[in-house]
Image (cartoon, rainbow, N blue to C red):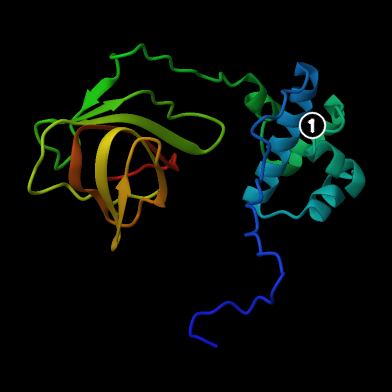
Amino acid sequence: MPSGASNRTAGEAPRREREPVLLQDPHAVREPRENNLERAIGHAVRERRKRLGITSADLAATTGLSPGMLSKIENGNISPSLTTLQLLAQALGMPITGFFRGYEEVRNAVFVKAGEGIELERRGTRAGHQYNLLGHIHENTSGVTVEPYLITLTTDSDVFPTFQHPGLEFLYMLEGEVLYRHGDRHFHMQPGDSLFFDADAPHGPAELLVLPARYLSVIAYPQSGRTG
């Protein structure tokens, strides 16, 4: 059999690659507000318990709650009484009001009109390379900061900046053509193409093939911060 030939027998259907499993439903419908309170309390209890390194069995024993009852509280399936909240607060060493912070937090939104993004000068950039920040919400409940940029490249250059920072980055090509480098690989990006990668590897434009070039760059990293 020639080298590289398939081991598949005649008539056998080609194998399909396994589809990625999503950890959450991005199209989930928000539950009624009264249920959100129970979920906020449950999330606060579980987060505090895990932060202290306490098992659910130990917390149940300390508070006198049954393991099943504690599980229902942490999953937001029931509304605990004030007495139960007081027991949990004492066992977890936190004020009762701490259980409601997630419920009371403001969920922000940023709206940017066309052409009104904040122009930033990233380290190593040159004239004709424009970076517009389209929005920024640092404090949020996800634990992740997301920075969407509209990048416009209008002049060619012999030397391009190389970026490297923690987190993930997503590119979507809007106009022009760019040869984009990530690590030791190069990707010829045309309108409609996208690239999703670990931003901790050296990356950046390697060659501008068709100008002007415009693409979206969405960077996500932990709220603890990012450099680069």
Return the residue nearer the eye: 8 or 99.
8
Q: Is residue 38 left or right of residue 111?
A: right
Residue name at image x 56 percent, y 32 percent: 141
Q: Position of residue 79 (x, y in %)?
A: 85, 27
* Residue at disc 1, secondary structure: helix
Return the residue nearer the eye: 98 or 161.
161
Q: Position of residue 82 (x, y in %)?
A: 83, 25
Residue name at image x 33 percent, y 30 percent: 149
Q: Residues within 10 Å of mark 1 (few under 14, many from 20)?
A: some
Q: Position of residue 162 (x, y in %)?
A: 20, 50
Return the residue nearer the eye: 64 or 110.
110
Residue name at image x 42 percent, y 14 percent: 111
Please identify the residue farthest to the top as the structure is shown: 113
| Image: 27 above or below 1 | above
**In which quadrant is the N terminus drawn?**
bottom right
Image quadrant assignment for residue 35:
top right
**In which quadrant is the C terminus drawn?**
top left
Determine which residue is flagged by label 1: 86
Which amino acid is tagged 1?
A: Gln
Image quadrant assignment for residue 27:
top right
Residue name at image x 38 percent, y 14 percent: 112
Return the residue nearer the eye: 62 or 135.
135
